[in-house]
Image (spheres, helix red, strand yellow):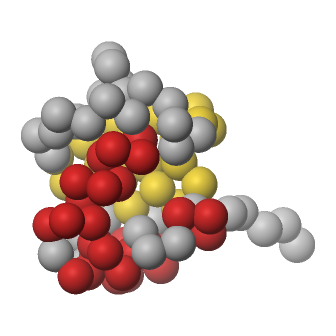
């Protein structure tokens, strides 16, 4: 599946997107797998309360299942002006 990173998440990880092979069943499981990879992922996902997630471009929750999902995007909350 494709994993896309926006804003400071992208800056901490150093990639705008990547394709990952995963056995994760939920978004939270995927985050745990990513955090275990390297320190830069661990730093980016240290506080998931400061993140939002979208599955196939639809806002979702970290307990959402990943079955059938093609794209997961992580980004900070959006603010308006």
Residue drawn at point x = 59 percent, y = 54 percent: 52
* Residue 9 image offset from top left, x and y in percent: 43, 72
Whole-percent x, y for residue 63 in the image: 52, 37
Give the image quarter of residue 76. Answer: bottom right
Along the horizontal axis of the image, is 13 left or right of 38?
A: right
Q: Is residue 25 left or right of residue 39?
A: right
Q: Is residue 68 visible?
A: yes
Residue at figure coordinates x 41%, y 41% from the top left:
27
Tell me where residue 49 sits by quadrant: bottom right
In the visual, does 75 lie left or right of 13? right
Identity of the residue drawn at 46% across and 56% down: 74
Can you say which quadrant of the picture contains the C terminus? bottom right
Q: Is residue 56 visible?
A: no
Q: How many marks?
A: 0
User: Residue 6: x percent and y percent?
Assistant: 46, 65
Which image quadrant: the N terminus? top left
Examine the rendered structure and indicate whether residue 45 appears above or below residue 31.
Answer: below
Which quadrant of the figure has residue 15? bottom left
């Amino acid at each position: 599946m494709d994993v896309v990173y926006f804003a400071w998440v992208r800056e901490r990880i150093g990639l705008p997107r990547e394709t990952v092979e995963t056995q994760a069943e939920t978004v939270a499981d995927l985050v745990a797998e990513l955090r275990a990879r390297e320190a830069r992922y661990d730093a980016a996902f240290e506080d998931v309360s400061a993140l939002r997630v979208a599955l196939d471009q639809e806002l979702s929750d970290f307990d959402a299942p990943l079955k059938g999902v093609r794209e997961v995007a992580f980004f900070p909350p959006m603010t308006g002006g």
